Image (spheres, helix red, strand yellow):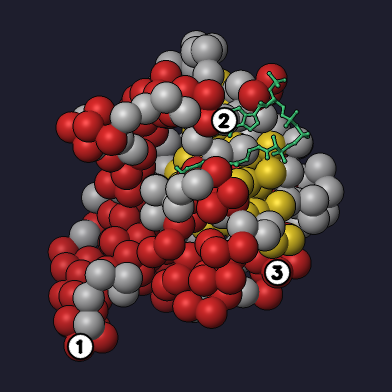
């Protein structure tokens, strides 16, 4: 993965096995325009292909993870253009990334910014993080998964209130409702996310990919099918060298050295 500074997304390697992608449109509070999403998708796909990288951290600035889709870019859009180009479809490419993505949220995660956060696999938040789906105030509704992903995570009543009133919700609410896995000390959210990513990157790449895939199946299918899918993936891991190494290391009372095979 190259660490060249691109315009809207900064790419760095805080650790050899971790890619850190930082949204970088500070003057627009990281509003998500098509150029930014093009760069973000390219960086995510490059990190996914890079054999040295085991997990990805996605963050914004202290003030804004992302303040939503770029309103200035889309305000004059017509229905026919939006429909013909399937506007926002490229946002969902993130959900086909196989490696874990840890979102580190400080400040505003509104509209498309909240939806971007919801597409991460694990979310950590600063105490100042502010989430919300304010699209109703603009005469529209969430268009990148807010009504669907939030409902699955926090339920119908809360999602309905948020989507129909446009009120923001706090980091505390996000933690209580299970949107974020935890709130961390102010100023430490990126470091904590890199620690989580680094820990994950130390495990077997095949089992990590299988774990992510299995959890995601829970959102797509029935319990019976999901349990079967999980069990089959579990069975398949007995074909990997990492399973042999992990269990041998346990019995020999030493640390496992996973190879991702
Ligand atoms: N699109 C474009 N520009 C944005 C933006 C957005 N979503 N959010 C902020 N900006 C710009 C502002 O226009 C402003 O630019 P100028 O200096 O050129 O005027 C700059 O960022 C700083 O913003 P503010 O001056 O408004 O900063 P603030 O601290 O007073 O307020 C805020 C912060 C509450 C986040 C406010 O900026 C805001 O309400 N932003 C819009 C949030 C929103 O409605 N998001 C949903 C977008 S629609 C969507 O996302 C659809 C979807 O589901 C995909």
Give the image quarter of residue 161. bottom right
Q: Position of residue 205 (x, y in %)?
A: 34, 50
Give me the C-alpha separation between circle 1 and circle 2: 41 Å
Residue under numbered circle 2: 31
Q: Is residue 154 above or below residue 87?
A: below
**Which circle's residue, 3 or 2, is located before the other in the chain?**
2
Left or right, 222 with respect to 137, comes to: left
Give me the C-alpha separation between circle 1 and circle 3: 31 Å
| Label 2 near ligand 1 (CB < 8 Å) | yes
Residue under numbered circle 1: 224
**Which circle's residue, 1 or 3, is located before the other in the chain?**
3
Q: Is residue 37 above or below residue 216?
A: above
**Which circle's residue, 1 or 2, is located before the other in the chain?**
2
Q: Position of residue 185 (x, y in %)?
A: 82, 54
Q: Position of residue 244 (x, y in %)?
A: 28, 65
Q: Is residue 235 above or below residue 116?
A: below
Question: Secondary structure beneath disc 1?
Answer: helix
Image quadrant holding the N terminus, namely: top left
Q: Is residue 249 above or below residue 5?
A: below
Give me the C-alpha separation between circle 3 and circle 2: 23 Å
Residue under numbered circle 3: 173
In the foreground, 150 or 83? 83
In the foreground, 150 or 242? 150
């Amino acid at each position: 993965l190259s660490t060249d500074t691109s315009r809207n997304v900064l790419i760095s390697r805080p650790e050899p096995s971790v890619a850190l992608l930082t949204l970088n449109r500070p003057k627009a509070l990281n509003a998500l325009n098509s150029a930014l999403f093009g760069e973000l998708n390219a960086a995510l796909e490059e990190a996914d292909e890079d054999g040295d990288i085991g997990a990805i951290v996605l963050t914004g600035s202290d003030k804004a993870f992302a303040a939503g889709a770029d309103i200035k870019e889309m305000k004059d859009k017509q229905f026919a253009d939006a429909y013909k180009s399937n506007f926002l479809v490229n946002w969902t490419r993130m959900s086909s990334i196989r490696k874990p993505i840890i979102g580190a949220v400080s400040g505003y995660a509104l509209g498309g910014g909240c939806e971007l956060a919801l597409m991460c696999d694990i979310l950590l938040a600063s105490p100042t993080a502010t989430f919300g789906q304010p699209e109703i105030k603009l005469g529209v509704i969430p268009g990148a998964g807010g009504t669907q992903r939030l409902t699955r995570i926090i339920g119908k009543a809360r999602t309905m209130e948020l989507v129909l009133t446009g009120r923001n919700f706090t980091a505390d609410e996000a933690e209580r409702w299970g949107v974020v896995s935890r709130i961390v000390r102010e100023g430490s959210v990126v470091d904590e996310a890199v620690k989580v990513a680094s820990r994950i990157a130390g495990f077997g790449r095949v089992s990590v990919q299988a774990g992510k895939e299995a959890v995601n199946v829970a959102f797509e299918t029935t319990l019976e099918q999901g349990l079967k899918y999980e069990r089959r993936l579990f069975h398949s891991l007995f074909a990997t060298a990492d399973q042999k190494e992990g269990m041998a290391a346990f019995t020999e009372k030493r640390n496992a050295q996973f190879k991702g095979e």
